[in-house]
Image (tube, grey):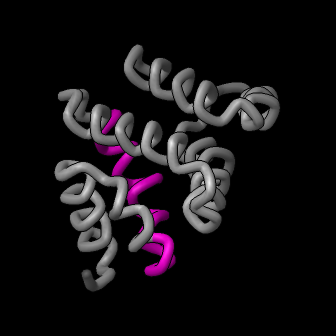
């Protein structure tokens, strides 16, 4: 895992501290950080719940501001990781995606559209 990815995971745990135990358990179970598994199975369910409830706007805004920062960071691996996990998952539910789009920056929005296209989902 590269430095930018490590920073991403630390930041996500800062945003979602209740995910720390599951994060550590995943590493213990698999003996390493399986990046896509952690994002899809640990972080995204919590983010989807935040979007569905739309009660903690400040946290949602901070997460999506960070996603925009990651989307423009220049680290191809991290950008791809964000696209094929978090942004792709957002497209699984159109109502959740509509909510998320209110908080997405322009680069994150474009990456999410591309993620949908890459898996053959119409946009």
Magenta-tinted stretch: 78-96
Relative depth, front residue between 115 and 102: 102
Q: Position of residue 88 (x, y in %)?
A: 41, 63
Q: How would you classify the magenta stretch by its main secondary structure?
A: helix
Q: Quadrant of residue 16?
A: top right
Specify the quadrant that holds the C terminus. bottom left
The image quadrant that residue 33 belongs to is: top right
Left or right: residue 85 versus residue 50 is left
Inspect the magenta stretch and tell me whether residue 8 lies in it. no
Instruction: Please determine whether, in this image, residue 63 is positioned above or below residue 52.
Output: above
Residue 81 appears at what percent x and percent y?
A: 39, 43
What percent of the width, then of the height, locates residue 119?
A: 33, 73
Residue 5 place in picture, x, y as percent? 44, 25
Observer-nearest residue: 67 or 102?
A: 102
Give me the residue at 22% from left, 64% from top: 114
**Viewer-side residue, 75 vs 105:** 105
Vertical position of residue 70 compared to residue 48: above or below? above
């Amino acid at each position: 895992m590269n430095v930018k990815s490590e920073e991403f995971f630390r930041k996500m745990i800062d945003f979602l501290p209740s995910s720390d135990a599951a994060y550590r358990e995943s590493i213990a179970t698999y003996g390493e950080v399986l990046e896509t598994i952690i994002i899809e199975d640990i972080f995204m369910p919590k983010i989807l719940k935040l979007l569905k409830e739309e009660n903690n706007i400040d946290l949602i805004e901070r997460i999506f501001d960070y996603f925009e920062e990651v989307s423009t960071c220049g680290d191809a691996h991290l950008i791809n990781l964000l696209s094929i996990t978090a942004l792709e998952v957002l497209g699984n539910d159109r109502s959740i995606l509509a909510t998320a789009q209110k908080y997405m920056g322009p680069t994150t929005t474009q990456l999410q559209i591309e993620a949908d296209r890459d898996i053959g989902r119409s946009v």
